[in-house]
Image (cartoon, grey):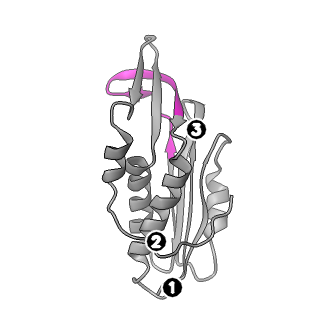
Amino acid sequence: MADFEVIRAVLTADPISEDDALAAVEGPEAGAVVSFRGVVRNHDEGKAVEGLSYTAHPTASKAMLEVVATLLDEHSEETGHPVRIWAAHRVGTLQVGDVALVCAVSAAHRRQAFTICSELVDRIKAGVPIWKEQLFSDGSVEWVGANEPMSRRTRRLQTGTVQSAAPISS
């Protein structure tokens, strides 16, 4: 069984540092360190974006932990090498260029690190009830995720029972 460790899995109003995430998961046994940084872009579907605001449901922090724990449970039988995971998603008002999501994974081999990091990003986006209010240059506003009930978003995650999870630190 692999030694999985969740270094961080949080929602935060504070800026997120990819450098901090990478430093937290690196180690002498890690042959691969993979990260993802989601950044607020200046456009969406042909419209100019001025900024956005993320709003989280009161259960979002718990959902974030469940997403990570489920992912760990599914990958725990792969290798006997340590895997470390770090994930943080911003809430509040962000400007174009601000970092909204950072995920970092370290593993002995690149395929495992890439796979887990990619799945982590997809599952956070699908399973953590966070809604995005986009503010467009023309003065219009669009809510992304607001029309989809939380139960439907959560159902998109693969279900599984988690027997135990590594401690979470903030």
6 is higher (above) or lower (below) than 140: below
In this view of the protein, which residue sits in the foreground, 131 or 21? 131
Neighbours of disc 2 within 10 Å: few (<14), some (14-19), many (20+): many
Judging depth in this view, the residue of 62 and 123 nearest the camera is: 62
Q: What secondary structure do most residues of the magenta stretch adopt?
A: strand
What x and y, as percent, mark residue 63?
A: 48, 53
Point 35% across, 45% down: residue = 151
State the extent of the magenta-drawn residues as a range: 38-54
Cα gap from disc 3 to disc 2, whole angstroms = 24 Å
- Give the mark nearest the N terminus, 1 or 3: 1
* Callout 1 amino acid: His
Left or right: 59, with 48 as reference point: right
User: What's under tag 2, amino acid-wise?
Assistant: Leu
Label 2 sits on residue: 72
What amino acid is labelled 3 in the image? Val
Rendered location of residue 51, percent (x, y) = 52, 25
For residue 81, the mark is: 1
**Residue at 40% of width from left, 22% of height from top?**
142
Point out the frontmost of discs 2 and 1: 2
- In the rendered view, would you say 81 is above or below 142? below
Q: What is the x, y in percent for residue 37?
A: 52, 49
